[in-house]
Amino acid sequence: MGEMNTAELLVQCLENEGVEYVFGLPGEENLHVLEALKHSSIQFITTRHEQGAAFMADVYGRLTGKAGVCLSTLGPGATNLMTGVADANLDRAPLVAITGQVGTDRMHIESHQYLDLVAMFAPVTKWNAQVVRPSNTPEIVRKAFKIAQTEKPGAVHIDVPENIAAMPVIGKPLAKDGQAKTYAAFSSIEKAAELISKASNPLILVGNGAIRSNASKMLTDFATRLNIPVANTFMGKGVIRYTHPLALWAVGLQQRDYINCGFDRSDLIICVGYDLIEYSPKKWNPTGSIPIIHVGMTPAEVDSSYIPEVEVVGDISDSLQEILARADRTGQPEPYALELRADILKDYLYYSKDDSFPVKPQKIVYDVRQVMGADDILISDVGAHKMWMARHYHCERPNTCIISNGFAAMGIAIPGAIAAKLVHPEHKVIAVTGDGGFMMNCQELETAKRVGTPFVTLIFNDGGYGLIEWKQHNQFGESAFIKFGNPDFVKFAESMGLKGYRVEACTDLVPILKDALEQDIPTVIDCPVDYQENLRFSQRAGDLSCVI
């Protein structure tokens, strides 16, 4: 506990929290923090844009449950960081953002690059603070990590003025407090069991909270033994394996889809680890008439379409186990649920042999699933391809398909894939992106090559903002302002020392994917996509009848 400067104490506190990586950019106002990191066990990963750094910390947090850390300088560095910080906060991923700042001696006047960053980050974080007394650093860092990692997890922000960072201080990191599990009240467990026992047609809706609390095994056992079908949100993929006979796959498309029929016919929805931000209850319970059981680590949010009959708040696995022990429900689900699964499966397999070109999105997603193992990880960007990934890419395990559906920020896939490969170097990783999202953070492919994270970037190439075109056609019957040009993506990859591929026939895709996944450098696949399927899906979904 010798004398050091505040930046050195800050880095000691980060080490104490088990931080492995700090993602960020060097800047004049964070020089002391960078110098301290140079002598630390923590690996600093220099990124090409602060947004990329924040997305890396975001996905690291989502995959590990430990806060990812990103670092920027003040002013434009901090504003660049904000999108990824907001994404982590609304996707409930633990993240700690650290920003440099002007010295406290020039905050009261107009000063070069000065913004009130504590005020600026307040709307996109759970908590934030500025270090104004060097001796408070251990408390601030411990509080930041505790808040970031506690349910519902999210982002926090620490602002470090440059003169404070350089000041001498005596101190040491605080011990981490052991947070014990909390358990639900027996009265709520008994009421939930009673409602389930009486229900003739219950349905489970599972969200990302079940993944965060490692409730996959118990949820699967619960559904299997009570014979209750399970739908998942985009962010709840893999909680129950997609091959399970009770799995009804993903819900959350803005268009009406098969799974909506399941909600329409249900007389009880059991929401497990479900977060309203993942898929609004107004979409599946518009009149608020379906009875709901809320099973989660935190109480239900307030929404006129989400007023639970009972809230079972505590450790999710324990809650499910206790409900299961008391629920008296036998027999099979109603035949409609099994027929519904058969219809969903038929729709999924419909394009498996389609060889048209440009490639249909359903076929691309089907082929990707065929080449990926059960533990391999796919990171989806945001755009029209995300709708198809969410609908048709199914998982055997939790956290093997990362989709942002809280904040839903474009540009997350490539930085996210870097984080995924750092966390799981033994697994194959694919970043699936549109050509729009690709061009937002493609510079991080240089970072990927430099830090040695080989993964595949698969581009759905349609020369425009396909999701917006889809929405415009649905609403106005025509589109505007959505077309753009692209570089030659193969040459772009090669110019960075990567390997590039171009899909020129539908039959090219699987062999290209297999070859790309074996490379020891990052690879880029340019795949032309036929987004006529978007409008066909909308038309078919509009005609969908729930009379089975």
Image (cartoon, rainbow, N blue to C red):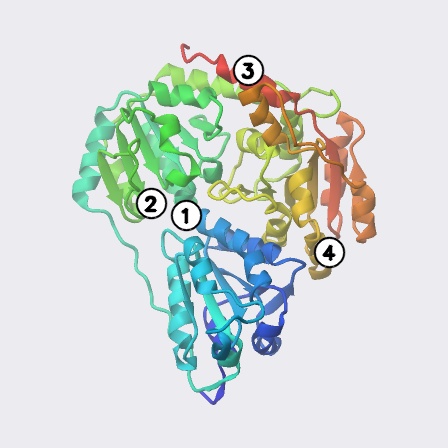
Label 1: which secondary element: loop
Spatial CA distance of label 1 from label 3 is: 38 Å
Contact? badges 1 and 2 (CB < 8 Å)? yes
Q: Residue at x 29, y 38 (%)?
A: 294
As rendered, which of 252 and 106 lies closer to the eye? 106
Q: Which residue is mark 2?
A: 317
**Quick one: label 2 or label 4, which is nearer the N terminus?**
2
Looking at the image, can residue 402 be seen?
yes
Contact? badges 2 and 3 (CB < 8 Å)? no
Vertical placement of 339 versus 151: above or below?
above
Inspect the image, locate mark 3, and give the three-letter code of the amino acid beneath it. Gln
Vertical placement of 121 versus 283: above or below?
below
Q: Which residue is mark 3?
A: 539
In the displayed image of the protein, which residue is found farthest to the front? 110
Spatial CA distance of label 1 from label 4 is: 34 Å
Tag nearer the camera, 2 or 3: 3
Inspect the image, locate mark 2, and give the three-letter code of the amino acid beneath it. Ser
In the displayed image of the protein, which residue is found farthest to the top? 547
Query: Where's residue 503, x and y in %?
Result: 78, 32
Contact? badges 1 and 3 (CB < 8 Å)? no
Q: Residue at x 37, y 67 (%)?
A: 143
Q: Which residue is mark 1?
A: 214
Q: Which mark is residue 446?
A: 4
Spatial CA distance of label 3 from label 4 is: 41 Å
Query: Where's residue 398, x and y in %?
Result: 49, 43
Q: Which mark is residue 298?
A: none
**Quick one: label 2 or label 3, which is nearer the N terminus?**
2
**Residue 25 lies in what quarter of the image?**
bottom right
Label 3: which secondary element: helix
Near mark 3 (Cα within 10 A), the count class, few <14, some 14-19 or many ≥20, is some
**Quick one: label 3 or label 4, which is nearer the N terminus?**
4
Query: Where's residue 461, x and y in %?
Result: 71, 33
